[in-house]
Image (tube, rainbow, N blue to C red):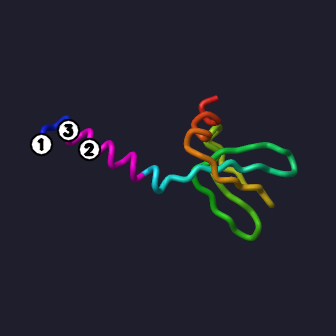
Amino acid sequence: MTKTFRVALIGGLMAVACAAGCHHYKITDPSTDKTYFTKSYKEKSGAVKFSDARSGADVNIQNAEIIEISGSEYRDAVKN
């Protein structure tokens, strides 16, 4: 196998693994209607804790609305 082929193969496998295991979420704070985007979150005692992909800020929200979104929706929202 050539080096170029191996690099392409590894890149392809990583993309497939991410597509199968990566999750993207849109999280809305119902009290302010502010929307956040993240790849992971933790729930504890009714609160949701995550890192906002746009600002990098750590966020805690009570009674958050969480929707799983596609990777393309996530990328479009975060790039702005």
Please name the residue shown 46% across and 55% down the image. Answer: 20
Disc 1 is placed on an element classified as loop
Image quadrant for the N terminus?
Answer: top left
- Asked if the residue at tag 1 contacts the one at tag 2, i.e. Cβ–Cβ closer than 8 Å, the answer is yes
Residue 59 image position (x, y, % from top left): 70, 51
Residue 44 drawn in magenta: no
**Separation (CA) of disc 2 from disc 1:** 10 Å
Q: Is residue 75 left or right of residue 67?
A: left
- Say if mark 2 contacts mark 3, CB within 8 Å: yes
Residue closest to the far left = 1
In the image, what residue type sits under mark 2? Answer: Leu
Asked if marks 1 and 3 touch (Cβ < 8 Å), the reply is yes
Quadrant of the image occupied by residue 33: top right
Which residues are the magenta region? Answer: 6-17
Q: Judge whether residue 13 is colored magenta.
A: yes
- Main secondary structure type of the part rendered in magenta: helix
- Kind of residue indicated by mark 3: Phe
Element type at mark 2? helix
Q: Which residue is mark 1?
A: 1
Residue 9: which numbered mark, if any?
2
Secondary structure, mark 3, is helix
Q: Callout 3: 10 Å neighbours few (<14), some, many (20+)?
A: few
**N-terminal of the two: label 2 or label 1?**
1
The amino acid type, in three-letter code, at marker 1 is Met
Instruction: Reply above or below: 61 against 6.
Output: below
Tell me what residue is drawn at x 59 percent, y 46 percent: 70
Instruction: State the mark number for residue 69.
Output: none
Residue at image mark 3: 5
Viewer-closest of 51 and 23: 23
Could you tell me which residue is drawn at 60 percent across and 31 percent down? 79
Residue 32 lies, in percent from the top left, at 86, 46
Q: Position of residue 26 (x, y in %)?
A: 68, 48
